[in-house]
Amino acid sequence: MSILRAVIYCRCSTEEESQVDALAKQVIEAKEAVKRNHWLLVDSFVESRSGTTAEGRREYLRLFDQMQSDQFDVIVIKSQDRLMRNTKDWYVFIERMQKNGKQLYLYLENKFYSPEDALISGIKAIMAEEYSRELSKKINNAHRHRQKNGGRMMLTNKTYALKKEPDGSVTVIEEQAEVVREIYRLCAAGYGSRVIANLLQEKGIRSKNGLFMTETTVRRILRNPLYKGDMILNRTHFDFDTKSLIHNPEDQWIYVEHVVPAIVDEALWAEANAAMDARAAAKHQNGYYPKGSNPGKYNLSGILICGCCGKPYYRTWRRGYRDPEEIVYEWKCSAYINIGRKNHNRRDSQRKTSRLLADEQGCDNIHLREDVVYQLLEQLSGKYYQIQLQEKESIIQKTIQLLERVMSRNPSEQKCRDLKTERESVRKKKQLLLEKLLAGIVADADYQVMNRQLESRLQEIECQLEKLQEGEQERKNIAGRLEQIKARLEQGGVEKATAGQMLRNVEHIIVHEWQLEVCFNSLHIAGISNVEKTALSQILGKEQDQVRVFLDYPFDPTTERGRMLDRKMVSDILREEPAMTAKKIAQKMGRTTGVIITRMNELRRGGYIQYQPKGKHGYWLTLKEYPDPRTQKVAG
C-alpha cells in the first residue's frame, strides 16, 4: 500500500491573531497529525492573516489552485472554520476537492470529511459566517467606542513628521516637521501645491517612502488637521458583506482635538487652507487645482507629451540665471520632475538623481521655455490658414468617396436573404419533428433535445437579422449625415486663426529631443463641428488622418544643444564661404563675435576646420563635415 501524500493548511482566527504563538502551535499540531497517521508531508500552506473569504489569502489560493494537480492526496486542517467562514466559498472548495479525488482531514475531530457530512458542514459554515458577521460588528462598535472615549489613537509610521512610539505615544520628527511648516508658510503666501512640490524637489526633500514629494502629497499634508494636533476618526468602517471599506457620512465622523503634538499653529493651518479654498473657488474645484490651473498665455496643460517616455509635461518656474529677479517658466517631463534623469552619469545643473532611485525610470528629454514655445506656435499660426484650406479640400474628397462607397453597395443584403432562407428551413424542421413525435416515431426525450437545438438556432438567426436591419438603417443614416457635411463644407469658408484659436484644434504636441511634433485632428481643422466630427470619426475609423507639423526647437546658444547647433551652422557657412570672417558670420547668425570665435576654436580643436594663411587674410579649410546633432543621441 502506497503512503498517502499530505499537505497542511494553517490559519489563525481573528480572535487568535493577538496570540503570537497561536499560528506556530497550530503548525506543530498539524505536522504531528500527519506523522501520527504515517503520511508523507509534501507541502505547508501557512496563512499569516485571518479572513472570512478566499480573497486576499495567498496561501489558500495557492492550495485551491494546486488541488487540480497530482501533488498530494490529503489536506490536513485543524477544523472547518480554519478554511473559511463563508458558506459559498466552503461549498466551492469541497466541490473542487471531491472532483480532483482529494481528502480533507480535520485533526481536532480525528476524522476525514465525507459527503454524508455535507448537511452538517453546511450548517457549520453558515454558523461560522454568522459568527464572523457578529464579530465584525463588535469590532466596528469597539473602534467607535474607543475613539469617542479617547482611547489610543491609530497612527501609521508612514505619517510624515510624526512617529508612533512603542508605548503608543506620538512624537515629532523635527527635521521633517520643519518641512511641513515650510509647506504651510508657502501655501499661505500664495504658492500652489505643484509649485511647492517643485521647490521641495529642487531641495532634494523626499517623503518617508524615499520618493520626491508630489503635488498630491503636498495637498494631503495641507488638508490634514493632524498637523495642528487634531484628528478626524470614524471616516470609514469595514463592511463584512462587501468585504470593503465604506466611507461614513460626515455627521458620523468623530473630531478629536489636541491628541498629537501640533506642528503648525491653528492660525497658520487656517490661513493655508483658506488660501487653498480661495484658489479652488476661483476654478470651481473642491479644494483641488484643476489641470492647467496656471496655464500662462496659452493653456498647454495636457497637450505637451514626452516623446521619450510618453508622460505629460508640467509647468514649472525658476529664477533667471543672470537676473535672479527674472521668473522663467519652463515645461518639464513629469517623469523627470518626480524621479530625475534616467541617465545617472549625466551632469545636470538643476537636478542630480539619487542612487536610491536607480531602479526607477526617470527621463532625459529636454526642458521647454514657455516663451519660446509661444513664439513657435505664433509662427505656425501664420501658416495654419494654408493647412486649413488643404485639409478642407481633403475632407470634402474623402466625404464624397465615402458617400459613393456607402450608397453603391450593401454587403448585408445577401446575408439577410441567406438567413431568411435558413429560418424557413429551421421552422420546417421543427414542424416535422413535432409530427414525428405525435406519430410515435421520436421518443419524448429525443424530441426535447432536438427541439431545444432547433429553437436555439432559430433565436440566433433572429438576432442576426435584427443586427443586419439595424446596420441597414445605420447605413442610411450615415449617407444622410455625409450629404449634410459635404454640402456645408462646400458652402462654408475658412477664416484665419490666431495662435490661441489654432491651439484648440491641437490634439497634442509631442516633445522630441530636437523638435516639437504638433498633431492636429484633420476633421477639426477643416472646420467640422463637434457633432459632425463625432459622426465622421465613427465612419472614417482608421482612415482618419492626423495632420503633423514638425517645428525645430531653437535652443539657447548657452546650452549644450544650442552650442552644437551653432557649431554645425558655422561649419556649414565656412564650407560654402571659406574666407568669411568671424564678424560677418556673427552678423549672419545673430550672435556676438566672441561667441562665433569660441565656436570656430572648438571646431578647430575637434579637427573639423583648419586655418590656411594666404596673403593678408587667408581662409578656412574644411577637413571633415561636422555631424548634424539632430540625427545623433546627445549624451549631455
Image (spheres, rainbow, N blue to C red):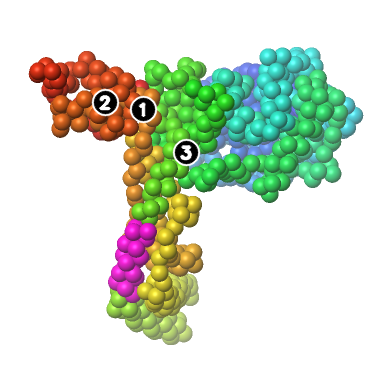
Q: Alpha-carbon distance for marks 2 and 3? A: 29 Å
Which residue is the site of mark 1? 557
Placement of 395 over or under 137, stated as above or below: below
Does the stretch in magenta take in 394? yes
Q: Residue flagged by tag 1: what amino acid is it?
A: Pro
Which residue is the site of mark 2? 583
Magenta highlight range: 385-403
Q: Give how far across and how far down residue 321 sits, in percent.
A: 49, 22
- How busy is the neighbourhood of tag 2: few (under 14 within 10 Å), some, or many (20 plus)? some
Sequence-wise, the earlier of marks 3 and 1 is 3
Q: Residue flagged by tag 2: what amino acid is it?
A: Lys
Q: Residue flagged by tag 3: what amino acid is it?
A: Asp
* Quarter occupied by residue 174: top right
Q: Give how far across and how far down residue 313 sits, in percent.
A: 48, 38
Q: Residue furthest front?
A: 616
Q: Which SS does the magenta portion mostly show? A: helix
User: Marks 2 and 1: in contact by CB < 8 Å?
Assistant: no
Which residue is the site of mark 3? 371
Q: Nearer the viewer, residue 582 or 461?
A: 582
Location of the N terminus (image quadrant)? top left
Q: Residue furthest right?
A: 149
Q: Secondary structure at mark 1?
A: loop
User: Marks 3 and 2: in contact by CB < 8 Å?
Assistant: no
Q: Nearer the viewer, residue 133 or 615?
A: 615
Q: Secondary structure at mark 3?
A: helix
Sequence-wise, the earlier of marks 2 and 3 is 3
> Which is more foreground, mark 2 or mark 3?
2
Placement of 517 over or under 4, stated as above or below: below
Does the stretch in magenta take in 510? no
